């Protein structure tokens, strides 16, 4: 069953089970979806188009399932025959890095919109904008962590360079999100 098809309670109970999936990657993605949902609400109450935000919300939910699939491939690769195990792990790790990388990219796509909500959004929902910034920051940080753990098994220099650039971009965005949340808190 997809994460989108589960109730919040069902999903969280699955996370709490003694299983490796869903885990941190799926939590990161659903946290991004929560940020996008809050942004969409503020946009609607502010007469601002929310189409891109709703697309991001659905992308995040799909990425939660993709993260589970990627992690499952890594676990299977560890059981590959010894003579092909290292190659299998590298290939699976590269695939597993895709979901968190896409979480980061999706989060990055929302940065300008969340900044605009600070000035153009409904002022009665300013704390919802701050909460969305905090949740999006958590998604970016978690995505970076999940990229980094997968990079350990990858030797492809172009892929590593691409991921390092994405990680650096996420760091810049996280600073912007922190400033948004701090400025909102200071204004209260």
Image (tube, rainbow, N blue to C red):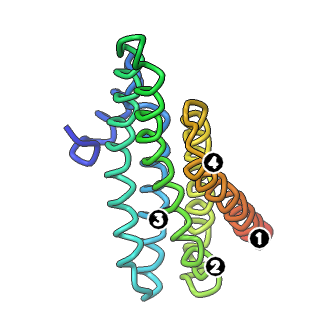
Calculate the distance from the C-alpha at mark 1 to the C-alpha at mark 3.
18 Å
First along the sequence among labels 4 and 2: 2
First along the sequence among labels 1 and 3: 3
Calculate the distance from the C-alpha at mark 3 to the C-alpha at mark 2.
13 Å
Say which mark, if any, is on residue 38.
3
Closest to the observer, 168 or 140:
168
Q: Residue at x 77, y 70 (%)?
A: 183
Calculate the distance from the C-alpha at mark 1 to the C-alpha at mark 2.
9 Å
First along the sequence among labels 3 and 2: 3
Calculate the distance from the C-alpha at mark 4 to the C-alpha at mark 1.
20 Å
Q: Residue at x 37, y 49 (%)?
A: 63
In the rendering, at what x and y percent does residue 156 appear? 55, 43
Q: Is residue 176 left or right of residue 74?
A: right
First along the sequence among labels 3 and 4: 3
In the rendering, at what x and y percent does residue 19 appear? 37, 19
In the rendered image, which quarter contains the C terminus? bottom right
Residue 10, placed above or below residue 125: above
Kindly identify which residue carries mark 4. 141
Q: Residue at x 54, y 78 (%)?
A: 113
Say which mark, if any, is on residue 183.
1
Circle 2: is it few (<14), some (14-19), or many (20+) Cα within 10 Å? some
């Amino acid at each position: 069953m997809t994460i989108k098809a589960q109730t919040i309670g069902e999903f969280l109970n699955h996370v709490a089970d003694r299983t490796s999936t869903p885990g941190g990657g799926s939590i990161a993605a659903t946290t991004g979806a929560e940020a996008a949902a809050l942004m969409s609400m503020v946009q609607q109450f502010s007469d601002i188009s929310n189409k891109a935000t709703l697309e991001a919300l659905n992308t995040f939910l799909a990425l939660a399932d993709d993260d589970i699939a990627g992690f499952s491939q890594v676990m299977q690769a560890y059981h590959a025959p010894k003579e092909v195990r290292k190659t299998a792990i590298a290939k699976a790790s590269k695939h597993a890095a895709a979901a968190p990388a896409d979480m980061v990219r999706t989060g990055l796509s929302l940065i300008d919109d969340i900044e605009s909500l600070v000035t153009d959004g409904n002022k009665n929902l300013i704390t919802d904008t701050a909460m969305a910034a905090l949740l999006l920051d958590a998604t970016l940080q978690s995505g970076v962590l999940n990229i980094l753990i997968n990079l350990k098994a990858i030797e492809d220099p172009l892929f590593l360079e691409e991921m390092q650039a994405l990680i650096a971009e996420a760091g810049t965005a996280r600073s912007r999100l922190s400033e948004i949340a701090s400025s909102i808190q200071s204004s209260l």
